[in-house]
Amino acid sequence: MINLTKGISNSLLKNKANFLQKKQFLNSINYWFSVIPHEKKVHILYSDYNNIHFNLATEEYLYEHSDLKHPTLFLWRNDKTIVIGRHQNPWKECFIQNMEKDNINLARRRTGGGAVYQDLGNSCFSFLTPIFDESLPLDSKKVNNKILLQALKNVGIEAEFSGRNDLLFQGRKISGSAYQINLGKTDGTGKKALHHGTMLLNVDTQNVKQYLNPNKEKLKSKGVDSVISRIINLQEVKPDLDHKMLCDLIEQEFINHYQGYEVIRDNLKYESLQNQPKIKEIYTELKSWDWIYGHTPQFTNTIETRFDWGIVDVNFQVNNNVIKACKVWSDCLYADYITRINQLFNEYQFTYDQSGMQQLCHLVKLEFYTNPDLVKFTEQLEDWLKRSI
């Protein structure tokens, strides 16, 4: 059972109205998660609030700070927003001036992947999955995509999975997603996965053009000349499909997949969640300038390329052939991989030459030697860095 009472101060306990509100929230959260780990239950949660930073904070709280014991589906949507991946450069991915002029939100998520535009014509899904036996496999993304594709198929939309993280209808994108795995504790407990993404229902495509600045090489690799030509709204295929109907379809297919599991539904109320200390803390961080923009100094050299696993943009500040500062931007889905590369650039002083790049990549391979994919990525990265500097 999760213990959320720790953060309640004495002064709050004296305030009866706040305490009752807090108690209601605690009872609800405990009802979702205070159950035996292997008891067959699933949770379906809806957000009634359309703020991207708050919804991301709620999702992070559910995934990282609640006692996640059962497969959970979280359905939500946001007002006009650009969401960038954890290691993307906002000044390269977005038209910041247009966004500020039109009061468009900018958010940076914790997961990797690329930039997306969202509005109320866009539905968001999050699958939060504890992994404790073979019935809930480590790669739960395959299961989740099967649920999404079947939900669409049930209303005559024949979509398919494509590339790293997209769902396509007749070659055009209707959904993108990102994924992360927490391998838990050394005793093997606490494994869990987060898979979240979007469905394009009736997104304002002119706003996509107005606020997103797509990488030309990425578009070229997809065989298209613009973001607009690459995407399609589901309402162009099925005009009566709205947010509620889509959520109902996904919910029903989620229940079908976990046949025989008890279903617990709840609508998450902003009035209750906003006073939860941890959610407020996460929300404040996700909304901060430091998290969204970070510190971006002027660099003396910038190189960029595209691998099958993502675009990599490396910015060097060099003095006397020593790298004094470096920032790696990427839409790679392995966000922790890019995080560690950035950390290594800060922890060590590498020379700005082939030897320095070899030393960096040797350390990266030592960190990720158990993951063959990341070792392969690092070999490709090393080859490119040596040729480019």
Image: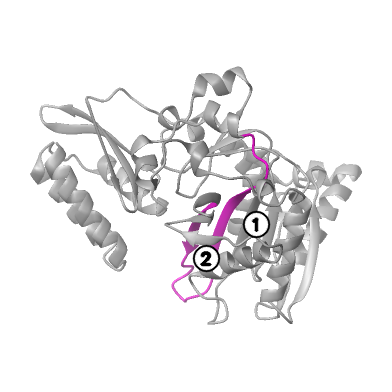
* Residue 46 drawn at (x, y percent): 75, 54
Q: Which residue position holds label 1?
A: 62
On-image quarter of the C terminus: top left
Q: Is residue 307 left or right of residue 286?
A: left
Above/below status of 114 relative to 191: above
Query: What's under tag 2, amino acid-wise?
Result: Lys
Q: Is residue 362 above or below residue 72?
A: above
Q: Earlier in the sequence, mark 1 or mark 2?
A: 1
Q: Nearer the viewer, residue 298 or 174?
A: 174
Element assignment for label 2:
helix
Residue 111 x %, y % = 49, 50
The span picked out in magenta is 175-204
Q: Where residue 249 sits: x, y (%)?
A: 73, 62
Task: Mark 1 vs mark 2: give the one in front.
Answer: 2
Residue where numbered disc 2 is placed: 141
Amino acid type, callout 1: Leu
In the picture, measured across the screen, residue 49 lies left or right of residue 131, that is: right
